[in-house]
Image (cartoon, rainbow, N blue to C red):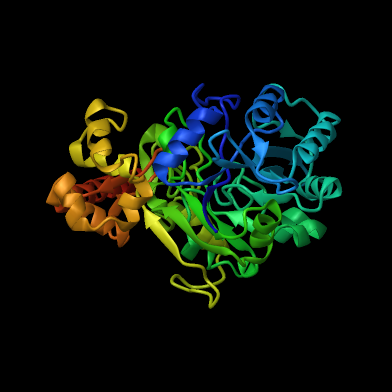
Amino acid sequence: MNFVADLHIHSKYSRACSKDLDIAHMEKWARIKGLNLLGTGDFTHPKWIQELKSNLTETEKDSGLFQTASGFKFVLQTEISLIYTQERGRKVHNVVIAPSFQAVDEITQALLKRGRIDYDGRPIFKISCPEFVEMMKSIDNRIQVIPAHAWTPWFGVFGANGGFDSLKECFQDQMKNVHAIETGISSDPPMNWRIKELDNINIVSFSDIHSFWPWRLGREATVFDIEPTFDSLAKALETGKGLTQTIEVNPNLGKYHLTGHRVCNVCLFPDEAKKLNNVCPECGKPLTVGVDQRIEELANRPLGYKPENAKPFSSLIPLSELLAQFHSKAVASKKIWEEYNKLVTEKTTEFDILLNMPITKIAEKTSQEFADILAKNRAGNIEVKGGYDGVYGVPLLTEQDIAENKKQEVTIKKQQKGLGEFF
């Protein structure tokens, strides 16, 4: 059975998240997107776990998957922030996927001995990554721990500020129990293929949605061809068998892809940032080192390397973002929703539009110009102005957009070159 899964999300009980991130809205937007398996998010939060227990029932006895009254499937999931100090600061987020409410209750009780769980859906603990994985496996060996958004500067295991340069350094003797990593919005599989240590680690992609806009569910997802049980899901994450492909966002769209300093509107490619010693040429403060630069620092394989066992993937820009850029309107505006609903209907999901519907049929529903953009999106041929330091990237849909962006880059580089002489 094929599952299009988003297994890293947050609930209304996580900080800066919408009150609409409840079970009903999650199911609604997952169906609109074309997902059929979701993580629950935030299962350690005392109010949220009560809602989960009230709204979800196990699909079959001991299956480890749960469903709503209308049959939409969930798996119990949360994200835990580990912040601890050794020689340098260690800051790592991990996704945790559990097989039962009993396991979740035991996880919660174990964590309560180390701190609070009631203030945020993603609680923080002063626990090392090896100790945390060992703790999870001692509760139930089927529990999956996946380094979240692995390359993000803040709290990614490989991130510039995470404190580690390898999975082995981070997880030590518990490396044997880490089988997958999450790419995060700002990286994609080819970027990860350049790291030899990841050869036997499965690459997964999920949305990590914190948004007030729940349609961002599934902006990244993973496709599994497995039996509808937790054990089958765990086996796919551990071995790669049954994990068929990932759906990625163009990594330039991610808000930490390039190196930069948002306050000064400074955005740099890796070679430019290195020349400046990762110091902002405008103000002299440290730059936020982006994913692209961090991969260049740790890569032990050339650009373009592809392993023999590499899984296929699709690189897509979500439909809402394309429509907003095409019409020069805010992504949540009435106009964009009108255009979105011309394409996405009760019978046609967003993934159907992005991946499968004939371009001629799309042109009939919108325009040939926008249909051509969707064709380029499927082929991964849309240029994107790279995101940096918390600023999302921008799709460049026309030749004029591309030309104007290049002109801006030349102007900015000239300005930065002059300022760089003072640092």
Q: Is residue 138 above or below residue 109?
A: below
Comparing 383 with 344, the one in front is: 344
Horizontal relation, residue 323 to residue 153: left or right: left
Quadrant, the N terminus: bottom right
Q: Is residue 22 visible?
A: yes
- Residue at the location (69% across, 31% down)? 123
Q: Residue at x 43, y 72 (%)?
A: 304
Place of residue 235 in the rendered image (x, y in percent of width and height, measured from the top left): 69, 61
Q: In the current view of this chain or complex, which residue is farthest to the bottom?
A: 308
Left or right: residue 321 versus residue 188 is left
Quadrant (top left/top right/bottom left/bottom right) for the C terminus: top left
Residue 138 placement, left or right of 258: right
Left/right of residue 286 with respect to residue 322 in the rendered view: right
Q: Answer above or below: position of 114 versus 383.
A: above
Q: How many marks?
A: 0
Residue 266 x/y as whole percent: 37, 41
Residue that appears at 27% across and 32% down: 337
Q: Is residue 389 visible?
A: no
* Of the pair 136 and 228, the residue shown nearer to us: 228
Residue 113 appears in which quarter of the rendering? top right
Residue 232 placement (x, y as % from top left)? 67, 58
Q: Position of residue 393 (x, y in %)?
A: 35, 44
Q: Residue 32 occupies which quadrant of the picture?
A: top left
